């Protein structure tokens, strides 16, 4: 524990750099909400881990509900930023779709708290996302890139015509989401570790294969 004389200096630094303090609170809050959900998370615990106070957290964010929304929105924003870093317009449609599927695989694996937060929010029937208008400002670059790749594939006669970008996105996301969120129950029931390094490359290729097979198969 830090000496008492260090506390005024630390508090002074926090006052001089409120944005950094808010980011630190958000990082800890994101972990707390991902682990325990909205109902189970405790602002007191977030305060303890950030060496701040509950009063200061409410000063910055207003309430537990608004802190949760900020953590959720920040997680979506981080995913959007990751998606913006990829360029697939120069790739042929099949390679572009496979690349986007692999991107989704990678970002779910690199950001497990995002999947867990979304899972908790679904258990609440998206209450907070709906109440905040669905985070409309956070456009999803992956949807735009995927739509363009599908349109090019259809125009070139490579992909079937009866496809919908959101259905394809759901197919990709469901595989990646399941692998992260259900890894513990899957291991307990079947003795298979879905995230072990030895299987990673196979699973990453598998989702690309599944999507490409669906897009290039003849509709029934």
Image (cartoon, helix red, strand yellow):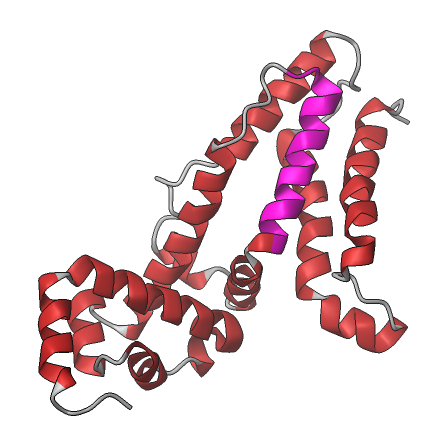
**Residue 130 visible to an observer of this rendering:** no
The residue at 18%/66% (across/down) is 60
Residue 100 among magenta residues: yes
Q: Magenta segment range?
A: 91-109
Compared to 217, does 128 lie above or below? below
44 and 109: which one is in front?
109
Compared to 170, does 149 lie above or below? above
Q: In the shown orientation, is residue 220 left or right of residue 25? A: right
The quadrant of the rendering that contains the C terminus is top right
Q: In the shown orientation, is residue 47 left or right of residue 15? A: right
**Residue 171 visible to an observer of this rendering:** yes
Residue 98 screen position, x and y as percent: 72, 31
Q: Number of numbered discs present?
A: 0
Q: In the shown orientation, is residue 101 left or right of residue 125? A: right
The residue at 36%/84% (across/down) is 45
Residue 23 among magenta residues: no
Figure quadrant of residue 112 = bottom right
């Amino acid at each position: 524990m830090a000496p008492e004389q260090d506390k005024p200096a630390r508090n002074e630094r926090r006052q001089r750099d409120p944005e950094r303090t808010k980011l630190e609170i958000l990082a800890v809050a994101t972990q707390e909400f991902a682990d325990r959900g909205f109902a189970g998370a405790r602002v007191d615990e977030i305060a303890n881990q950030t060496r701040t106070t509950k009063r200061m957290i409410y000063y910055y964010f207003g309430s537990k509900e608004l802190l949760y929304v900020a953590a959720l929105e920040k997680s979506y924003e981080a995913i959007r930023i990751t998606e913006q870093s990829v360029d697939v317009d120069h790739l042929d449609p099949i390679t572009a779709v496979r690349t986007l599927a692999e991107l989704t695989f990678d970002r779910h694996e690199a950001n497990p708290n995002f999947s867990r937060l979304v899972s908790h929010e679904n258990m609440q029937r998206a209450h907070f996302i709906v109440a905040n208008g669905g985070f409309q400002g956070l456009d999803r670059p992956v949807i735009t890139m995927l739509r363009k790749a599908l349109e090019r594939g259809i125009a070139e006669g490579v992909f079937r015509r009866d496809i919908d970008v959101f259905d394809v996105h759901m197919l990709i996301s469901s595989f990646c989401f399941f692998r992260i969120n259900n890894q513990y129950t899957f291991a307990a029931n079947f003795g298979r570790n879905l995230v072990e390094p030895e299987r990673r490359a196979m699973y990453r290729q598998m989702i690309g294969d599944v999507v490409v097979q669906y897009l290039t198969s003849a509709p029934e």
